[in-house]
Amino acid sequence: MTSSAPAPPGRPAPTMRWFFLGLSGRISRLPYLLGILFLMAVSGFIIGRLASVPEQSGAAAFWALVALSFGLLSIWAMVAISVKRLHDMNVPGALAICLFVPAVSFITVIVLCLWPGNGGPNRFGKDENRPAQ
C-alpha cells in the first residue's frame, strides 16, 4: 500500500500495518477491494492446508491454531479497512458495526466497494490512502 511518491513533510507514509490494523485515515475503493481479496486468499490458503492434513496429526493442530489466530486477526483487519473506507466517504467509522449483522454485512461490503469517496480533504484526513495526521 505504499506509493512511489514520498510522503509529504509531516505526513506519515502508509504501511501495511496501518492499512490492516490502524483506524485513522482514509482509503479509496481499490485498496479496500484488494485488502478484502487478500484476506480471503490467505484464509482460503489456511483452510486448504487445514483440510489437506490428517485430522489427528500435529499438523492439523498447528493449522487449526493458525486458522483461529488468522480468523481473529482478519476480523480486526476487516473492521479497520472498513472504518478507513467509511472515513473516505466522510461517514463515521462506527457504521462498520454493520459488518456484524449477517443480513446486512454482504450489502455493506458491496456498497463500500462501489460507492465513491469524497474528493479532496474531509474531516478524517487530507489525502486518500494515507494515515490521518
Image (spheres, helix red, strand yellow):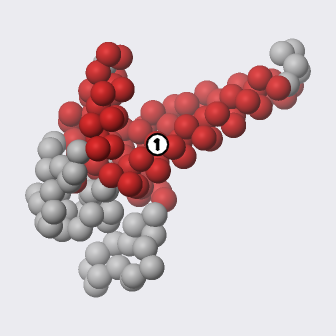
Taking 93 as reference, is 10 above or below it? below
x and y, in percent, of residue 67 in the image: 65, 30
Query: Which residue has dot 1 on it?
Result: 36
Examine the rendering and report whether any part of residue 83 can be seen: no
The one nearer the camera, 95 or 56, is 95
Taking 119 as reference, is 42 above or below it? above
x and y, in percent, of residue 63 in the image: 74, 30
Examine the rendering and report whether any part of residue 93 can be seen: yes
Decide if residue 20 is on the left or right side of residue 65. left
Residue at 28% across, 84% down: 9
x and y, in percent, of residue 1 in the image: 46, 63
The kind of residue on which mark 1 rests is Ile
Residue at 73% across, 30% down: 48
The one nearer the camera, 37 or 56, is 37
Instruction: Please tell me in which quadrant of the rendered image residue 120 appears.
Output: bottom left
Quarter holding the C terminus is bottom left
Decide if residue 87 is on the left or right side of residue 73. left
Taking 31 as reference, is 107 above or below it? above
Residue at 28% across, 48% down: 85
Taking 115 as reference, is 30 above or below it? below
Q: Residue furthest left?
A: 123
Decide if residue 99 is on the left or right side of residue 115. right
The one nearer the camera, 32 or 24, is 32
x and y, in percent, of residue 59 in the image: 84, 28
Residue at 55% across, 31% down: 71
